[in-house]
Amino acid sequence: MKRIAIDMDDVLAKTTHVIIDKINQLVSKEYTYEELLTGDEAIKLEFYGHYLANNSFLWEPGFFTNIPVNEDAVEVVKKLHSQYEIFIVSAATEFPNSLKEKLDWMEMHFPFITWRHIVFCGHKHMIQADYLIDDHEKNLHTFTGTPLLFTAPHNIHIHDFKRVNNWKEIETLLLD
Ligand SMILES: [Mg+2]
């Protein structure tokens, strides 16, 4: 059985959407996910400037608890689960509060994936699998299987990996 490692933030979870809402509140702006995905570089640079200066909320209790699940993720992961060995791999240890919150989040949205198949780590370069679905190139560059780049505003300029834009595309790619 082939193994798929799946990232959480911005793959299973709509983390950047929540970050945008937080930044909008903190700096009184109205950035949208769509403009960060497709808009011009100046808007992105401005947004990420605000983000770097105001991202302490990532370390606050409760941040990860209420992040919405990505469209079609539950349905497609459930289908993948019947044909592949699935591991959820999240570089979460930088955010100690997130560990319990992420376990609870998985239990709430993906109860068919148990704690035996959830890996919280710092680096991902030791992860061995056939596929890694992740939004960060730093995780994909060191991966020895087939890397799949899940589209997010911060990776739209990356062209080194096969790109998947949503969970329906993953379904088409990995399921018969
Ligand atoms: Mg991620």
Image: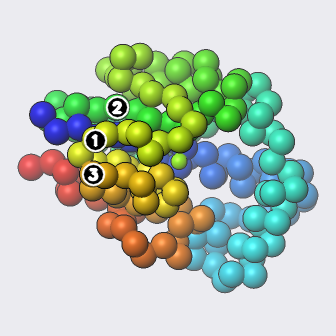
Q: What is the count of numbered marks?
A: 3
Which label's residue is closer to the chain start, 2 or 3? Answer: 2
Which label's residue is closer to the chain start, 1 or 3? Answer: 1
Is disc 1's CB within 8 Å of ligand 1? no
Quickly name the residue at label 3: 145
Q: Do the residues labelled 2 and 3 touch (CB within 8 Å)?
A: no
| Of marks 2 and 1, the one in the foreground | 1
Determine whether the residue tagged by mark 2 lies in a helix, strand or loop: strand
Question: Can residue 19 be spotted in the picture?
Answer: yes
Q: What residue type is labelled 2?
A: Phe
Q: Are marks 2 and 1 in contact (CB under 8 Å)?
A: yes
Quickly name the residue at label 2: 87
Q: Which amino acid does label 1 sit on?
A: Ala
Which of the numbered marks, if any, corresponds to residue 129?
Answer: 1
Q: Please give the name of the residue rendered at 72% of the width and 55% of the height, measured from the top-left corner.
A: 20
Q: Are marks 1 and 3 in contact (CB under 8 Å)?
A: yes
Q: Please give the name of the residue rendered at 42% of the width and 54% of the height, measured from the top-left corner.
A: 142
Q: What residue type is labelled 3?
A: Gly
Determine whether the residue tagged by mark 3 lies in a helix, strand or loop: loop
Image location (x, y in percent) of residue 61? 76, 25
